[in-house]
């Protein structure tokens, strides 16, 4: 019995224990302890991230003569670390004061903890998959487990969860089709067998497989145009659940896509396939899909007036960066893509938790109903500030490093248009995260929020630790780049040369220690000037200038509604809801078709159809 | 206390420091102050019409380092460009008190000097310096941009020599100004700014800072406590 066995068994046990202990008041802490133990077991396998060989589980199952087995390599470990860390943070957050409050609001925090553990188990199973069959089993479990997380609160979340499962089922069908085709070609579900025949596949087969898997797994990632389910479904999930789903759930699609498309089929094949009548290769098409996945959802996020929706839309957009980076042959790009998974999870979890903290105190996430909370919740403000700097990709936070790697590789590979596209996406990110922090924490404090306080420590500590991670891995990106490099080696793609402070390779140098030192040196000079000057006096927010007007608490001078009106004047007419329209017209077409079928079915005696179907199937099997 | 008595009171200007290096530093600070004056975008009456030409390319105030500024917190100069009705005067005082020290007030047009053509009006404040300490008047109805620029240059000169410190007078003789304000606006008059607190903070309390009028103020005042950061 090795660490992997221990991890999977403990994870299954946690699901069972939290399932039975739902009604216990201490179910939350129990779940946190179990997740903590799983983290420890994962740490036992930390050697994987520093070059140890892959660990295989000592048990395997055989279904219809096909063996299912599980193994962990550096890539699985990297994703598992993110999964368990974000689950632990969400679990601790939900276990304390937030859970009590959730119970008072009529929710069941025990069920949330159970769903969290179930998701972790499903994800670990997927990450540990050692063959295509166990990958599919893990994939389905992940889909249904995240559905449980989305619908457990009921209401609007349930409706959006159903929308998700329609997409997910369609995706799963595509994946299954692909796997059946692979089975027909190789007669087995082993990765190695598929990898062996991959070079001899015809171009048509490669295109088919790529499209099937990119669709199937892309649905989970929210790739354009299958992204419409995600934002609403995640946003309506109860706070810590949304933080967990937002941080890592969608990245499972990326993980599976990495295994099948990049590791097994290989980017080399995709680059060599030309799209007829164009100068695009299949890889370029996927990169442009990633680029549009960055731009459209990010600019949709900018228009949201609900903090949770704003963040959830960003989750879709940031997935585009990861895919774009990983589709690059350059080691800079793929390292950037992988690192972005880690970085993004770290700050997205905190951002969702901070927004949940704001909801916990004010009962609203409506960006037009908040403002000025910085004086009441200064630590939450600080953490949101750290994390939006990360999300926008600005030094000294970790988001800058991964985005820099992706930009740099786009420049090195000579892809100026994609570079511009990703920079436009970043522009949208900066604008919308500014809207988020301005409308929530800056500006005028409302009268009804005068008396609120900072959130309790049980909610604060997970956020503090995660935002410390955001800063530390920005200051010393080498910590994460070690893991990323091992994951690259496990995937069989070129490995990034790196140092503790960043990258040192012929195609680009980055030293975050130096950058951070200069930045903080600048801050120090500013602080010196500020504190050596006259003592500043704090004034009340109503002692403010409004053209000489005497302000009272009834005056709203916090500008939040119709934010970026000037920008919207120029780009507002480009928001046409084309994808919404596409989805709804597809839905209408399907319902029309089913109505027609039903009419046909009902217009004759239904038994006749049954008889016809039975006869045909008998003929098929007899023949 | 009458206006004449007020004028007799000299504000104790800071004595020249003995350390020659400190003097160099003080001179440098005053020079910089005089060459970067931000005037608040707040005008009253009809004199404002002379400012666009003064600010724009024909006379180009900016070559003297004078720029418009949108908030009083960062502004140095408050321009009163014409008659001040009682309603406007309240806003002028509010805005003046929101400006950070050192701050300078310039009264432009005859109306700010003695009420001008509004002498007989019941709703207009006649003499601006009964309510605010004024550094400089530019008389005329209305003064041309050349006159405005001339006045500005005089103000610069006064700042450079350290004479333009009437803002200190507002702190050290607050009771006098407040009394005149109360006479116009009634005893309930108050602004959000805590002038007495600021006087203490800047160590500009004088014998005339507190008096009978500030007592009335302290009775009616509903202070706005600044929002403290709470953990």
Image: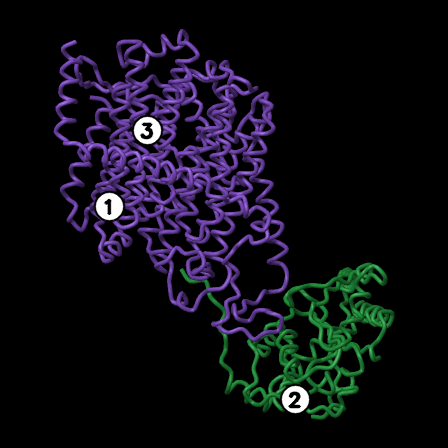
Circle 2 residue: B180
Q: Residue reaching furthest top?
A: A200
Q: CA distance from mark 2 to mark 1?
A: 68 Å
Disc 3 on helix, strand or loop?
A: helix
Chain A's colour?
purple
Mark in front: 3 vs 1: 3
Disc 1 on helix, strand or loop?
A: loop
In the rendered image, which quarter contains the N terminus of chain A? top left
Q: Quadrant of residue A120?
A: top left
Instruction: Identify the chain drawn in green.
Output: B
Crowd tier of the residue under label 2, counting other residues whose Cα lies within 10 Å: few below 14, some 14–19, many 20 or above:
some
Which of the labelled discs sits on residue A462, or is there none?
none
Q: CA distance from mark 3 to mark 1?
A: 23 Å
Does A424 appear above or below B50?
above
Disc 2 on helix, strand or loop?
A: helix
Crowd tier of the residue under label 1, counting other residues whose Cα lies within 10 Å: few below 14, some 14–19, many 20 or above:
many
Q: Is residue A395 visible?
A: no
A304 sits to left or right of A12: right
Expressed as whole percent of the image width and height from the top left, the position of residue B73 reads 63, 66
A608 sits to left or right of B118: left
Mark in front: 3 vs 2: 3
Q: Quadrant of residue A583?
A: top left
A30 sits to left or right of A224: left
B189 or A106, nearer to the observer: A106
Expressed as whole percent of the image width and height from the top left, the position of residue A571 reads 57, 46
Q: Are marks 3 and 1 in contact (CB under 8 Å)?
A: no
Which of the labelled discs sits on residue A171, or is there none?
3
A62 or A91, nearer to the observer: A62
Circle 1 residue: A152
Q: Quadrant of residue B60?
A: bottom right
């Amino acid at each position: 019995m090795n660490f992997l066995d221990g991890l999977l068994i403990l994870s299954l046990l946690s699901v069972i224990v939290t399932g039975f202990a739902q009604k216990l008041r201490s179910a939350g802490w129990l779940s946190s302890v179990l997740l903590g133990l799983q983290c420890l077991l994962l740490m036992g396998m930390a050697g994987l991230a520093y070059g140890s060989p892959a660990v295989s589980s000592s048990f395997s199952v055989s279904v219809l003569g096909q063996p299912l087995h599980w193994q962990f390599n550096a890539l699985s470990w990297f994703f598992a670390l993110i999964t368990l860390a974000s689950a632990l943070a969400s679990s601790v957050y939900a276990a304390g004061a937030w859970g009590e409050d959730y119970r008072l609001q009529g929710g069941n925090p025990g069920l949330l903890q159970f769903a969290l553990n179930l998701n972790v188990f499903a994800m670990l199973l997927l990450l540990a998959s050692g063959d295509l069959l166990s990958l599919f089993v893990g994939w389905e479990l992940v889909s249904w487990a995240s559905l449980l997380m989305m619908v457990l609160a009921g209401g609007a979340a349930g409706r959006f969860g159903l929308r998700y499962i329609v997409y997910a089922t369609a995706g799963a069908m595509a994946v299954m089709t692909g796997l059946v085709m692979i089975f027909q070609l190789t007669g087995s579900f082993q990765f190695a067998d598929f990898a062996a025949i991959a070079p001899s596949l015809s171009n048509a087969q490669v295109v088919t497989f790529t499209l099937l898997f990119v669709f199937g797994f892309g649905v989970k990632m929210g790739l354009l145009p299958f992204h419409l389910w995600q934002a609403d479904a995640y946003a309506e999930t109860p706070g810590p659940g949304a933080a967990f789903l937002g941080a890592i759930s969608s990245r499972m699609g990326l993980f599976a896509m990495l295994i099948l498309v990049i590791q097994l089929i290989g980017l080399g094949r995709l680059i060599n396939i030309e799209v007829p009548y164009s100068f695009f290769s299949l890889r370029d098409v996927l990169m442009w899909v990633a680029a549009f996945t960055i731009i459209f959802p990010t600019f949709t996020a900018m228009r949201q007036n609900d903090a949770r929706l704003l963040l959830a839309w960003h989750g879709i957009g940031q997935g585009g960066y990861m895919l774009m980076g990983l589709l690059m042959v350059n080691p800079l790009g793929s390292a950037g893509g992988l690192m972005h998974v880690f970085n993004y999870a770290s700050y997205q979890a905190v951002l969702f938790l901070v927004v949940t903290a704001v909801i916990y105190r004010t009962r609203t996430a409506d960006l037009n109903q908040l403002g000025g909370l910085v004086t009441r919740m200064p630590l939450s403000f600080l953490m949101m500030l750290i994390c939006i700097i990360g999300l926008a990709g600005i030094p000294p936070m970790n988001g800058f490093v991964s985005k820099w790697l992706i930009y740099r590789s786009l420049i090195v590979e000579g892809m100026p248009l994609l570079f511009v596209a990703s920079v436009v996406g970043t522009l949208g990110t900066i604008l919308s995260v500014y809207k988020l922090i301005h409308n929530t924490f800056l500006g005028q404090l409302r009268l009804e929020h005068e008396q609120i306080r900072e959130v309790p420590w049980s909610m604060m500590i997970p956020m503090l630790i995660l935002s410390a991670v955001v800063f530390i891995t920005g200051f010393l990106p080498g910590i994460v780049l070690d893991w990323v490099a091992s994951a690259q080696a496990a995937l069989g793609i070129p490995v990034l040369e790196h140092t503790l402070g960043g990258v040192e390779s012929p195609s680009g140098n980055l030293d975050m220690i130096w950058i951070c030192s200069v930045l903080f040196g600048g801050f120090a000079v500013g602080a010196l000037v500020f504190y050596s000057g006259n003592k500043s006096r704090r004034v009340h927010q109503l002692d403010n200038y409004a053209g000489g007007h005497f302000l009272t608490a009834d005056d709203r001078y916090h500008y939040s509604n119709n934010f970026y009106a000037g920008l919207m004047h120029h780009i507002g007419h480009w928001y046409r809801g084309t994808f919404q329209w596409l989805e709804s017209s597809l839905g209408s077409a399907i319902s029309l078709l089913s109505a027609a079928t039903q009419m046909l079915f009902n217009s004759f005696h239904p038994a006749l159809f049954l008889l016809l179907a039975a006869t045909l199937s008998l003929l098929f099997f007899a023949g | 206390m009458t206006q004449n008595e007020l004028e007799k009171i000299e504000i104790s200007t800071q004595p020249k420091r003995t350390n020659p290096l400190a003097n160099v530093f003080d001179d440098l600070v005053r020079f910089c102050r005089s060459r970067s004056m931000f005037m608040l975008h707040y005008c009253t009456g009809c004199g404002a019409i002379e400012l666009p030409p003064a600010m724009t390319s024909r006379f180009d105030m900016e070559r003297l380092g004078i720029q418009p500024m949108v908030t009083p917190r960062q502004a140095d100069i408050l321009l009163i460009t014409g008659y001040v009705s009682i309603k406007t005067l309240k806003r002028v005082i509010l805005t003046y008190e929101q400006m950070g020290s050192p701050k300078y007030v310039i009264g432009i047009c005859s109306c700010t000097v003695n009420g001008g053509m509004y002498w007989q009006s019941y709703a207009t404040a006649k003499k601006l310096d009964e309510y605010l300490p004024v550094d400089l008047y530019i008389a005329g109805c209305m003064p041309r941009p050349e006159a405005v620029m001339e006045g500005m240059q005089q103000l610069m000169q006064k700042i450079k020599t350290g004479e333009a410190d009437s803002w200190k007078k507002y702190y050290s003789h607050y009771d006098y100004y407040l009394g005149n304000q109360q006479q116009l606006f009634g005893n309930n008059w108050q602004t959000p700014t805590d002038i007495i607190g600021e006087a203490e903070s800047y160590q500009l309390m004088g014998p005339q800072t507190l008096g009978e009028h500030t007592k009335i103020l302290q009775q009616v005042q509903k202070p706005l406590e600044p929002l403290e950061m709470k953990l």
